[in-house]
Image (cartoon, rainbow, N blue to C red):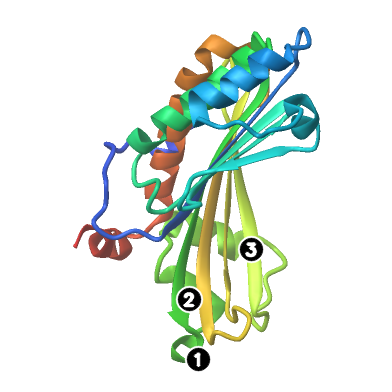
């Protein structure tokens, strides 16, 4: 038993329509020895064809930002952490992430990190709408257009909701029953007014985490596991009508 049986299992699928905004990874680790400047320079050159023209160690101390030419893919490299953000459409399926995940692994190898302390894999979805078209809908009616009874029952039973608020988000958490101390957090809600655009948004962020020390060599395998959990949870969160729209 993994603890995630509640979500069921779904086959990987690329939808024709999506409201995915971005995917993020965060990997923390403990360096076992200080890498040389030459090793760090080699990592940047081999993986990004990048020469920054200054002390790499110092740049990493302050958080070294590396991004693609179209700025859809961004890395931040720190002394004991690596971040990755892929915006849609740079990410359309997990297959798009393989090379970038591999770059994080190579960074950990360059940092002499044989284990990871924590791995996070997260997907953020945002479905926008014209606020004036939904002004007469209650918060519950608004969310029910997208979310399944699974989440709507949680919404109704969760104390503290305010029907008059213009922005609200709630969390649903599941702890895994596995050896890697995994967990998943589902953050869902809405915003009725986005700045001065006259738009609102229904939001869904799913974060899967491994909060225990694991071997760096298993990082890709662990992220693959987290991605599968998120995909199953994503399908569990949505109602059939929105799934049909995404398939059209």
* 21 lies left or right of 194: left
Residue 169: mark: 3
Q: Is residue 147 above or below residue 211?
A: below
Of mark 3 and mark 1, the one earlier in the sequence is 1
Question: In the rendering, which numbered label is found on residue 136?
Answer: 1
Crowd band around label 2 with a 10 angstrom C-alpha radius: few (<14), some (14–19), many (20+): some
CB under 8 Å between discs 2 and 3: no
Percent x, y of residue 75: 59, 39
Q: Which one is nearer the viewer's eye here, 195 or 135? A: 195
- Element assignment for label 2: helix
Q: Would residue 134 appear left or right of 247 to someone viewing this image?
A: right
* Residue 227 image offset from top left, x and y in percent: 44, 34
- Report whether residue 2 is seen: no
Q: CA distance from mark 2 to mark 3?
A: 13 Å
User: What residue do we see at 45% from left, 53% from top?
Assistant: 70
Residue occupied by mark 2: 142
């Amino acid at each position: 038993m993994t603890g995630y049986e509640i979500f069921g299992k779904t086959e990987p699928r690329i939808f024709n329509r999506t409201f995915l905004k971005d995917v993020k990874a965060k990997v923390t680790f403990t360096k076992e020895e200080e890498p040389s400047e030459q090793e760090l320079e080699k990592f940047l050159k081999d993986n990004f064809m990048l020469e920054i023209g200054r002390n790499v160690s110092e740049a990493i101390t302050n958080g070294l930002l590396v991004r693609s030419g179209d700025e859809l893919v961004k890395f931040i490299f720190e002394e004991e952490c690596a971040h990755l953000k892929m915006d849609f459409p740079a990410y359309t399926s997990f297959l798009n992430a393989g090379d970038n995940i591999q770059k994080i692994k190579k960074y950990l190898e360059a940092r002499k990190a044989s284990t990871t302390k924590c791995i996070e894999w997260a997907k953020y979805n945002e479905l926008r709408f014209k606020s004036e078209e939904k002004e007469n809908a209650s918060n519950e009616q608004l969310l029910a257009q997208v979310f399944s009874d699974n989440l709507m029952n949680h919404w109704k039973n969760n104390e503290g909701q305010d029907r008059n608020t213009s922005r609200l988000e709630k969390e649903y958490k599941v702890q895994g029953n596995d050896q890697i101390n995994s967990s998943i957090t589902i953050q869902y809600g809405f915003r009725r007014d986005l700045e001065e655009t006259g738009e609102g948004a229904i939001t869904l962020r799913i974060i899967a985490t491994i909060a225990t020390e694991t071997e760096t060599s298993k990082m890709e395998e662990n992220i693959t596991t987290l991605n599968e959990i998120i995909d199953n949870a994503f399908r569990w969160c949505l109602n059939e009508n929105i799934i049909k729209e995404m398939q059209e």
